[in-house]
Image: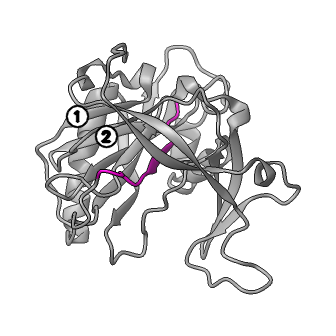
Amino acid sequence: MLTSTNLRTKNVSLNYITPACASSNDKPYRLFGIAPTVEVPETNIVFESHSIVVHDLRGVHDELDLEKDAFKLLKCSHSVKRTASHEEIISYAEQMAGRVQQETSADKVFMIDRQVRHPCSRNKMWPNLTLDQTKDGGWKRIRRHLTQAEALEYLGGNYRVRIMNVWRPLNDVVEDSPLALCHPSSVEDSDLVAADLVDEKGSGETYFLQHNPRHQWFWTSAMRKDEIYIFTTFDSTCAKIGTNCCIHTAFTDPTCRPDAAPRESVELRMLVLNRVADPQILVQ
């Protein structure tokens, strides 16, 4: 568990959902890949910027524990290119599934989604604070990737079910738009605001974050392409809404060189299944 207190820090601006938007009778939403109209704009979400202190994990990453901190920084020799083919991405995903399995002692791990982000990609960075799925949204996402037989086996209470993201930069060194992670112990349930994400396939549900001065944010300075983050974004054993799940965001580094290369990254979502000794009652 992260215990160091004398970490290097940096003051940055992060975009939180506004209290007015969070308390509105109209549920927040955003369209993805769907043309907005006058009646239905791209989003009804309003954000406000807050000055935040982020703490540098460089040099203390060995203290991180996925179970207690919900994120971990690891060295990783397996590489992938921005222009990787479908087959190369699948091969990389298999390697990363093995790494996640090693870190979590899972019985089964497999990729359910992938995102390659660069200046010309469709899936661009969105610099607002999100947790990829709510409880309901997480179960919906998981069921979409399981056969009926797999759902009966894995979602019957005999497995702990998690979604974990594996994120890595494709730049030699990240200068522009590094990734920040919020420690879950500093997030209250009341900080989280559910929102619909709507695309051509239907809708999912994610959380946005309201500002709370208790939030503890971390980043890794000069993160390299041979380093990865693994972090939890859904956990069936969470006692509360967001416990042990990791809010994350890209942010603008005020010390970044004006001519720094735009950040490029690849992110995998993994379904992580651990058999439990005592069957659980899963809230779905």
Q: Which residue is drawn at 58% across and 31% down?
A: 236
Residue 254 lies in the magenta-colored region: yes
Residue 167 at x, y percent in the picture = 32, 48
Crowding near the residue tagged with mark 1, few <14, some 14–19, many ≥20 C-alpha atoms within 10 Å: some
Residue tagged 1: 74
Judged from this view, the residue extending furthest toward the left is 77
Q: How far apart are marks 1 and 2 (CA)?
A: 6 Å
Of pointers 1 and 2, the one earlier in the residue sequence? 1
Q: Do the CB atoms of the residues marked 1 and 2 lie less than 8 Å apart?
A: yes
For residue 41, side relative to residue 229 (left or right): right
Residue type at numbered disc 2: Tyr
Residue at the far right: name it: 25
Inspect this view and state whether residue 131 appears. Answer: no
**Which is the main secondary structure of the residues drawn in magenta?**
loop
Q: Nearer the viewer, residue 228 or 103?
A: 228
Q: Label 2, on which residue?
A: 229
The residue shown at (17%, 52%) is 173
